[in-house]
């Protein structure tokens, strides 16, 4: 029996559909939604059936489709209008079976778009460009003269949340997403007054014919189920499944120095810190004598005497300890000390700006290198001044910006390449040198080199890794909006079994499906650690939540304290991991054995992580506690009481005394009394604090984390610690 509320929704839905659908309209629908496009090619309505909500704002003239030409090509149109990049709006659409035929103003061809109404989504695929009634107008050219086509362009009403990564608008009731169904479809959105346009676009040079997008509109509680079904039906990576894996929100123990000889030590530290994930930098298992300089070979190093089998055995030990091993790679990097660069540079390395030699260059010529094109946009940074012609890398000191154009002060055979003769007319350009240390360069993503590197990574992966971090993912060709995700995807496709979850140092639209979480930020020194947690991951956490995902609050480093520097202290990690836990996010911590062994507060640091990882695993935090923890100016400590149970206590840092520089303390309320948590920052010792009756002296033994219970007021405690002195 239908409830009264259900009847109201059904009635509203029927009325909305009746108003929207008229003669000549195109209606596309499934069990979750109904999209109505007028015969004039304007989207009129998108209704979520479960809620009866209208998702579109058709108040402005927003065509559902359009085509862009770099200039008008029809002869009369070219004569009538300026020759510039021109967008031609769709002015008609009709449906014939499983296809939409879209016509454009002043254009002689149509766009043929295949539509597929699946139970959870509707897809749109650009198939071809049939000539319209005007035909080719006698022009001897290959049709279509199209730069891009909007497969779908919807004016979606503003809702409480908009996720820019996935391209999804949602609130507590309804959600709508227009997303790429394959890696080369361009997705974007644009804010308007009261709504935003959601656009899926096919672009020449990426994928024109064959570009495919999917529209999904559903009740918000059902959205992730619908997206999961869509990913499976479209053969996409399972982004929803990855996000639902509980290990994706567990913090990560990172190591760059693990090997078969010390794996037990790393496991012991990871267990002590409650870590369920261990991320292993590829330099720990692969040949890598210098930072980035041999990246790309991915061969087991000498510490693994049985090669891949030794890696397999080490990972088996990690998994036997209940820890999931992950692989950290730089999949787009090619090191300068690899065979891909020396002695003959591989033609599949990326060139940023292209040039044509205006004069021949012998194998011994130096001085000037003449080109036809203006080099004004070429790099001036000394480490990035590298040209690439015919397998040889050539350095330069400068360039001219007036004809004849030339690079000056050229140096032959850079990066150990072999100098050779280069004829006039040879095409080369500026090598895409990595901005991090200039010890590597990037892959041309329009070649098969990324697949070749992916095959090498896959051989390492098959030793037993279970999750992956794609570092340096921003190092790709333009447009990065396509190639960032696709470079990661090309690696993902080679991995068996598939990763439980993935992260990356950069993200773009299609990567939502294979990246279960967003990037970790780079390391920040202890002196600014808390400020940077607020500035970066805590700022990004709500942004990522709008995309139904999480951010990694790492990377964090371990800095041993000294007489001059405070180093990494337990309250720093507690601040960061508590903020992360509030958003159900992990943190990644870089654990080098030497640094951990030399840190006097190592056990306290690991105990802090163990408690918060336990809290994460048990879903211990209440909604109210999460809300309080999210506030950047409030700081908390997870106290373990006499019964071994956790108590979340808000804390306040006590002032540091110049006479007791190693005493670090925090005050908090508990059970009607004040508690002081305190420790020595870089060793052990004693301190005198005036906190007894009538301000009498009290001696504190300083070493690991200790607690003091007192009835003294906050002000008295602040004064006592400000005047404390070490003995």
Image: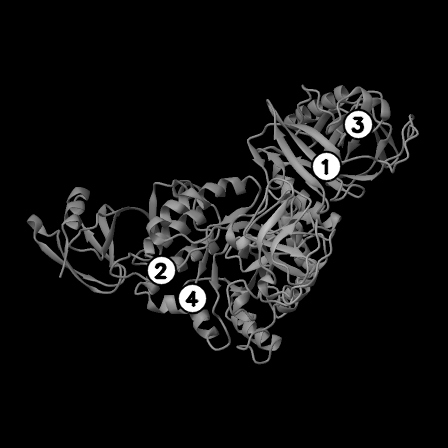
Q: Residue shown at 22%/58% (left/top)?
A: 662
**Picture disc at residue 592:** 4
Tell me if 172 is positioned left or right of 238 in this view: left
Task: Identify the secondary structure beneath mark 1.
Answer: strand
The residues tagged by marks 3 and 4 sit, at their Cα atoms, a distance apart of: 61 Å
The residues tagged by marks 2 and 1 sit, at their Cα atoms, a distance apart of: 48 Å
Residue that label 1 marks: 201
Between 101 and 267, the one lying in front of the other is: 101
Q: Earlier in the sequence, mark 3 or mark 4?
A: 3
Q: Earlier in the sequence, mark 2 or mark 4?
A: 2
Q: Earlier in the sequence, mark 3 or mark 1?
A: 3
Label 1, residues with CA under 10 Å away: few <14, some 14-19, many ≥20: many
Residue 22 location (% of width, % of height)? 81, 20
Question: Quadrant of residue 210 in the image?
Answer: top right
Q: Earlier in the sequence, mark 2 or mark 3?
A: 3
Q: Earlier in the sequence, mark 2 or mark 1?
A: 1
Task: Identify the secondary structure beneath mark 2.
Answer: loop
Can you see residue 79? Answer: yes
The residues tagged by marks 2 and 4 sit, at their Cα atoms, a distance apart of: 10 Å
Residue that label 2 marks: 559
């Amino acid at each position: 029996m239908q409830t009264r509320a259900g009847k109201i929704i059904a009635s509203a839905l029927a009325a909305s559909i009746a108003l929207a659908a008229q003669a000549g309209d195109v209606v596309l629908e499934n069990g979750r939604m109904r999209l109505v496009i007028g015969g004039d090619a304007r989207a009129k309505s998108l209704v979520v059936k479960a809620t009866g909500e209208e998702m579109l704002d058709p108040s402005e003239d927003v065509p559902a489709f359009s085509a862009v030409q770099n200039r008008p090509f029809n002869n009369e149109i070219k004569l009538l209008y300026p020759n510039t990049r021109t967008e031609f709006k769709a002015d008609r659409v009709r449906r014939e079976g499983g296809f939409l035929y879209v016509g454009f103003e002043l254009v002689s061809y149509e766009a043929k778009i295949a539509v597929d109404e699946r139970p959870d989504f509707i897809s749109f695929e650009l198939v071809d460009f049939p000539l319209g009634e005007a035909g080719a107008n006698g022009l001897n050219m290959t049709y279509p003269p199209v730069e891009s086509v909007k497969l779908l362009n919807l004016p979606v009403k503003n809702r409480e949340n908009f996720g820019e990564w996935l391209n999804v608008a949602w609130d507590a009731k309804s959600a709508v997403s227009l997303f790429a169904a394959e890696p080369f479809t361009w997705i974007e959105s644009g804010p308007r007054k009261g709504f935003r346009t959601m656009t899926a676009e096919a672009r020449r040079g990426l994928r024109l014919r064959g570009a495919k997008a999917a529209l999904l509109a559903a009740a918000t509680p059902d959205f992730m189920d619908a997206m999961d079904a869509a990913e499976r039906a479209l053969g996409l990576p399972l982004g929803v499944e990855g996000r639902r894996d509980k290990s994706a929100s567990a913090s990560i123990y990172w190591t760059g120095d693990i090997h078969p000889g010390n794996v037990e030590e790393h496991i012991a530290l990871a267990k002590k810190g409650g870590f369920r994930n261990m991320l292993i930098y590829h330099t720990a298992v692969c040949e890598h004598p210098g930072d980035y300089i041999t990246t790309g070979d991915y061969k087991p190093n000498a510490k693994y005497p049985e090669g891949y089998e030794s890696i397999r055995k080490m990972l088996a030990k990690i998994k036997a300890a209940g820890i999931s091993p992950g692989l950290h790679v730089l999949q787009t990097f090619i090191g300068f000390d690899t065979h891909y660069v020396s002695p003959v540079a591989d033609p599949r390395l990326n060139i940023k700006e292209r040039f044509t030699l205006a004069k021949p260059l012998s194998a011994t010529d130096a001085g000037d290198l003449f080109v036809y094109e203006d080099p004004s946009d070429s790099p001036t940074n000394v480490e990035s001044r590298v040209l690439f012609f015919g397998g040889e890398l050539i350095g330069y000191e400068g360039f001219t910006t007036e004809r004849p154009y030339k690079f000056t002060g050229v140096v032959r055979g850079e990066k150990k390449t072999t100098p050779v003769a280069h004829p006039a007319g040879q095409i080369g350009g500026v090598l895409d040198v990595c901005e991090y240390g200039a010890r590597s360069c990037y892959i041309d993503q329009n070649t098969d080199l990324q697949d070749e590197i992916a095959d090498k990574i896959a051989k390492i992966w098959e030793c037993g890794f279970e999750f992956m971090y794609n570092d340096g993912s921003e190092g790709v060709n333009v447009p990065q909006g396509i190639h960032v995700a696709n470079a990661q995807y090309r690696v993902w496709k080679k991995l068996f079994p598939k990763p439980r979850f993935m992260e990356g140092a950069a993200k773009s639209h299609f990567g939502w499906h294979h990246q279960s979480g967003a990037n970790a930020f780079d390391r920040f020194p202890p002196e600014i650690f808390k400020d940077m947690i607020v500035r970066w991951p805590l700022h990004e956490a709500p942004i990522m939540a709008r995309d139904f995902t999480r951010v990694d609050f790492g990377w964090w480093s371990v800095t041993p304290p000294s007489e001059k520097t405070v180093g990494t202290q337990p309250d720093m990690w507690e601040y960061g991991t508590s903020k992360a836990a509030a958003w159900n996010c992990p943190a990644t911590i870089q654990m080098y054995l030497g640094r951990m062994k030399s840190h006097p507060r190592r056990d306290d640091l690991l105990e802090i992580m163990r408690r918060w990882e336990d809290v994460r695993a048990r879903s211990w935090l209440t909604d109210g506690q999460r809300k309080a923890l999210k506030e950047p100016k409030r700081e908390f400590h997870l106290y373990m009481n006499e019964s071994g149970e956790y108590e979340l206590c808000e804390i306040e840092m006590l002032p540091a005394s110049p006479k007791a520089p190693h005493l670090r303390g925090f005050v908090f309320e508990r059970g009607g009394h004040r508690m002081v948590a305190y420790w020595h920052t870089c060793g052990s010792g004693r301190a005198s604090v005036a906190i007894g009756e009538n301000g009498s002296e009290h001696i504190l033994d300083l070493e690991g984390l200790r607690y003091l219970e007192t009835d003294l007021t906050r002000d008295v405690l602040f004064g006592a610690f400000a005047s404390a002195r070490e003995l």
